[in-house]
Amino acid sequence: MMSKSLQHKEPSPQLIFKTNYWFAIISATVGFLLYANTIMHNYVLDDKAAIVDNEYVTEGISGIPKIMTLDLWHSENANLGYYRPVSLITFAIENQFFPKNPHVSHLGNVFLYALTGFFLCLLLMNIFKHIHPVFSFIVTLLFIAHPIHTEVVANLKSRDEIFSFLNLIIAVLVFLEAFKSKVTNYKLLFISSVFFYLALLSKETATVGLFIIPLILFFFFNLTLKQSLIRSIPFLAIFLIFQFHKYLALGSISAQIPNDIVNYPYMAAGEKFSSTILIFMHYLQLIIFPHPLSYDYSYNQIPAMKFNLLTLLGLLLLIALSYVLLRGASKKNYFGLWRILFLYYTQPCSYICFGEGRNPCGKIFICSFLRTVHYRWMDYLF
């Protein structure tokens, strides 16, 4: 008889859980019920410029061709390089059949937010297929219920944010399905590319898809970094097509941003770095403890500051997160991925990569932007 030390024990296959569609349906229902009260709201904040005073939106369907050629804020005589026609097209269609009816538009936002919960839950169950679906369900519910998303749903103009995130989720979900078998499903790959293109046409923040896809493949599907990057080439091609499309529509892919204190709030050399760290910490605080919330984080809502003890604390926290990030990345574990994504998502609107002190997002701090950051954070907590 072979000794125990010489016996070969076959590794047991990892358990794969089936997708629970009821969890996705419940997530969507919760999202709808949470914001059903906003259906009876009126136009607020940027809704006036994006919808009410937008001559091509008020024209209805006949205004769609012109919408496809204009900056989001053309009605304000501004060229900020925001090419986001998808949400404006839906507003034009709504205005065709329900002229100047904010309640129909609010219903649309709530419905789209519910769809976000549905597809987010499906995506998480697909990625975390070796973990019981209850995990993905809880993460989705926490995301859907977090009050940081209020501005996105209640402010009609922020439909561009919902569309961008929703289309990106679907694009990633279908993309993963395309590579499930040994033979690539090019039909699904094409469908995924279409949804990614729609995400880009909704809002530029969808460019994070170029970063998300190879990371998910690298961390969760036992591929090398090179293999992950090669499989992500279709998304890169779509991004380049979008940039060309944007150039044809606007005549430029760059923005013409006024050189003033509103768009460059931290121009003073002694304020840029410290204020950047402060904003980063504000992101963390609102994700963990979302109070108080505000719809206005424009000029001076977060005052400029010079280097002090709070800045030092924030810098040390950022360094610690970066260190843990690198360790997690080297081990290819789940937590390493979410730390990478969290830092990647927060840096554009906290100016970490904008040394000239420019405000790249139109506001010093953006709650609607945090919805995407919060999705990564929920996964990180678990």
Image: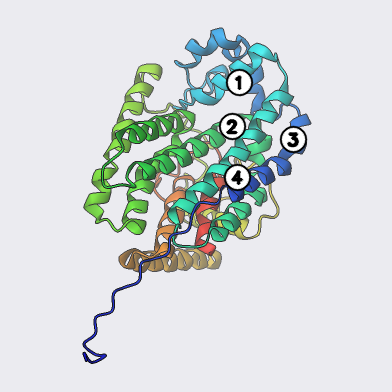
Q: Earlier in the sequence, mark 4 or mark 2?
A: 2
Percent position (x, y) of residue 317?
A: 48, 67
Q: Earlier in the sequence, mark 1 or mark 4?
A: 1
Residue position for label 1: 91
Percent position (x, y) of residue 215?
A: 35, 52
Please state which of residues 353 and 263 is positioned toward the viewer in this rendering.
353
Instruction: Report the amino acid beneath label 2.
Output: Arg
Q: CA distance from mark 3 to mark 1?
A: 17 Å
Residue 365, located in which quarter of the rendered image? top right
Please state which of residues 184 and 286 is positioned toward the viewer in this rendering.
184
Q: Say which element carries label 1.
A: helix
The residue depicted at 55 percent of the width and 7 percent of the height is 62
Instruction: Report the amino acid beneath label 4.
Output: Cys
Are the residues tagged 3 and 4 within 8 Å (C-beta)? Answer: no
Residue 367's disc is: 4
The residue depicted at 52 percent of the width and 62 percent of the height is 132
Residue 38's disc is: 3
Q: Of discs 4 and 2, which sits in the foreground?
A: 2
Q: CA distance from mark 1 to mark 2?
A: 10 Å
Q: CA distance from mark 3 to mark 4?
A: 18 Å
